[in-house]
Amino acid sequence: MKRPSKIKLIAWVASILPAGWFIINYALGAYNPYPTLFLTQFAGKTAIVFLLLSLACTPLRNIFSCSSLNQPRKVFGLASFYYALAHALTFLVLDYHLKWNWLLPEFQNKPYLLLGLAALLLLLVLALTSIRSFQKRTADLWIKIHRWVYPTTLLVLIHQYFAIKGDKRTAILYLVIFGILMILRVPFIKSKVRIKREDSFQKINRWLLS
Ligand code: HEM
């Protein structure tokens, strides 16, 4: 089996760290008296961060001419899906014990939950179709499906905006970051923001790929 590159290992470790952090603090009782609510919020926030990180890889690759930044895209995307799943399951199973007579009114009264559900289903499709054999067999279809990541992120960001009860500054900041990442994909802008090829970047790039 091929040894994973350093950048992939770094990305995997980075994806596991938040879960480790949560488990240690949970064991220490840091989230009492509402550990379930804390887990819902923590997993949701982590899912969004990884989604934005996966979207940031391509623009950063273009800006710094660092091909290694292609590699963490999938790892971050999958991490986002796993944290989003943990987030939704905590709410549906631990909080509401999958009781549909409790859940249905919640979904009816809080439309942002429906947006979250739609986003989760889209993330599931993206995760399932990221398997290499699917990617190889259906190259064109795969590219089309993976463009859904942009509307999916928008759904998630709207879901977050309406779900947060108090200060909405973080949600607005994430929307701005998403906007910037989208602008950096516009071909005209893309060609303007490229940083001159530096030897130091190329050295780091080779090290990350090794
Ligand atoms: C079935 C799908 C989903 C359900 C039922 C759901 C449910 C919820 C609920 C109930 C809250 C409010 C938590 C509170 O009381 O503070 C919330 C907030 C949030 N959700 Fe979801 N969600 C879903 C999907 C997603 C997905 C796919 C993501 C991200 C990829 C996500 C990210 C967030 C974030 C970031 C927050 C705000 C957390 C905070 O800062 O307080 N959700 N969600």
Image (cartoon, rainbow, N blue to C red):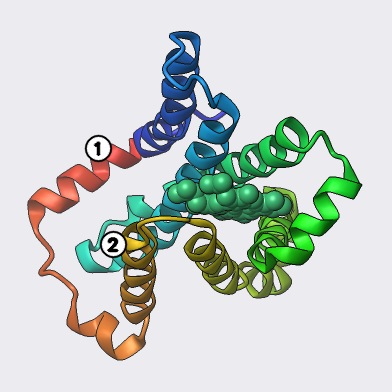
Residue marked by disc 1:
207
x 61%, y 41%: residue = 87
Local crowd at mark 2 within 10 Å, few (<14), some, or many (≥20)?
Answer: some
Q: How many marks?
A: 2
Amino acid type at circle 2 is: Leu
In the rendered structure, the answer to whether residue 99 lies left or right of residue 190 reads right
Callout 1 secondary element: helix
* 96 lies above or below 138: above
- Asked whether mark 1 lies closer than 8 Å to ligand 1, one says no
Dividing the picture into quadrants, the one containing residue 159 is: bottom right
Looking at the image, do the residues carrying marks 1 and 2 touch, with CB atoms under 8 Å apart?
no
* 43 lies above or below 183: above
Where does the image place residue 25, in percent across and percent down from the top left?
42, 16
Callout 2 secondary element: helix
Local crowd at mark 1 within 10 Å, few (<14), some, or many (≥20)?
Answer: few
x 9%, y 59%: residue = 198
CA gap between label 1 and label 2 equals: 17 Å
Dividing the picture into quadrants, the one containing residue 193 is: bottom left
Whether residue 179 is visible here, answered yes or no, is: yes
Residue marked by disc 2:
60
In the rendered structure, the answer to whether residue 180 lies left or right of residue 16 reads left
Viewer-side residue, 9 vs 210: 9
Please state which of the two labelled residues, at mark 1 or mark 2, is closer to the viewer: 2
